[in-house]
């Protein structure tokens, strides 16, 4: 399959944490096969510290099925450009990236209904587009050391880095912003793969989701354990459907290209095509 087209978008309404100017939103676009007229869109969101390119195993089958697929490298949270502490701390900026990308696509192409799919922190990202919000009090407890939090493998010194860059007043401002409503009414359905930060999600917002949600989780996932993440989302989002893709499947097999994870990736990609065929056509 052809490589995606790369668009170097910039969102001038939000800051670039590393330099002057607007927020970079580099976006990979996989054109829909056999596109004729309006094209249904599937937005994709990579895991923390990753890149949209990691999800080509997902994007290519969706594009082959006739969906226009697009996914950004989330600023400060991707290995292409390098890591910034804000990119890991300010997760609520990620769903805004997807909304921004959809707006750009609408200005350029005749697009139809839109859905979103994400892996790991990308799973939270797409849930935010259908109404899930974070609970600032829980995030504050993590920052204050009152709630346990495992160090991020990609950025183990995150809290120290944030404290080094921001004074307490600025940190409080960031924490208040964490509860922002990032729902996008243009997103008709969401698919979550091994979703992260489930324990930080606000219960009322989870219970208020009305759009279709599908969830897949891995039985041997030690990075986003299902009990605290996938199953919590599934248990509180009305009508959400969740399935385990295999007891021996690990978290990183969805992005490491390994032969061991091929069956799980193929299974999830097939389920995603079926889900979006049902919800977006």
Image (tube, helix red, strand yellow):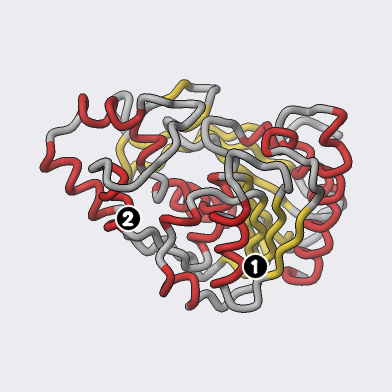
Quadrant where the C terminus is found in the figure = bottom right
* Foreground of the two, 109 or 157: 157
Under circle 2, the secondary element is helix
Q: Residue at x 58, y 45 (%)?
A: 224
User: Helix or strand or loop: what does disc 1 sit on?
Assistant: strand
- In the rendering, which numbered label is found on residue 253? none
> Residue 223 at x, y = what percent?
58, 39
Residue closer to the observer: 264 or 65: 264
The residue beneath circle 2 is: 138
Q: Is residue 51 left or right of residue 220?
A: left
Q: Can see residue 197?
A: yes
**Disc 1/disc 2 C-alpha distance (Å):** 24 Å
Q: Nearer the viewer, residue 183 or 154?
A: 154
> Is residue 190 positioned above or below 218 on the image?
below
Q: Which residue is mark 1?
A: 213
Q: Position of residue 73 (x, y in %)?
A: 54, 35
Q: Quadrant of residue 10?
A: top left
Crowding at label 1, few (<14), some or many (≥20) Cα neighbours within 10 Å? many
Relative to 43, 280 lies left or right: right
**Horizontal relation, residue 220 to residue 135: left or right:** right
User: Between 67 and 133, which is closer to the camera in this rendering?
Assistant: 133
Relative image position of residue 39 (x, y in whole percent): 73, 59
Residue at 84% in and 46% down: 61
Q: Quadrant of the N terminus?
A: top right
Is 280 placed above or below 195 here?
below
Location of residue 254 by image quarter: top right
């Amino acid at each position: 399959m052809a490589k995606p087209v790369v668009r170097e978008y910039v969102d001038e309404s939000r800051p670039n944490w590393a330099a002057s100017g607007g927020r970079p939103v580099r976006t990979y676009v996989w054109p829909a096969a056999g596109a004729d007229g309006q094209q249904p869109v599937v937005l994709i969101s990579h895991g923390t510290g990753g890149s949209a390119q990691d999800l080509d195993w997902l994007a290519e089958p969706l594009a082959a099925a006739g969906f226009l697929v697009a996914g950004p490298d989330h600023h400060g949270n991707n290995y292409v450009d390098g890591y910034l502490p804000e990119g890991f701390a300010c997760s609520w900026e990620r769903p805004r990236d997807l909304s921004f990308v959809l707006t750009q696509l609408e200005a350029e192409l005749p697009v139809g209904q839109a859905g979103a799919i994400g892996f790991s922190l990308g799973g939270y990202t797409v849930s935010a587009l259908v109404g899930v919000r974070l609970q600032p009090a829980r995030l504050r407890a993590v920052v204050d050391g009152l709630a346990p939090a495992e160090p991020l493998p990609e950025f183990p010194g995150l809290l120290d880095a944030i404290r080094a860059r921001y004074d307490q007043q600025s940190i409080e401002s960031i924490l208040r912003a964490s509860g922002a409503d990032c729902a996008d009414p243009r997103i008709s359905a969401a698919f979550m793969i091994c979703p992260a930060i489930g324990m930080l999600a606000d219960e009322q917002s989870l219970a208020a989701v009305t759009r279709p949600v599908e969830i897949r989780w891995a039985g041997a996932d030690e990075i986003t354990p299902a009990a605290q993440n996938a199953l919590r989302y599934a248990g509180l989002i009305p009508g959400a459907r969740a399935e385990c893709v295999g007891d021996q499947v690990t978290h990183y097999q969805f992005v490491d290209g390994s032969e061991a994870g091929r069956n799980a990736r193929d299974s999830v990609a097939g389920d995603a095509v079926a889900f979006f065929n049902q919800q977006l056509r």
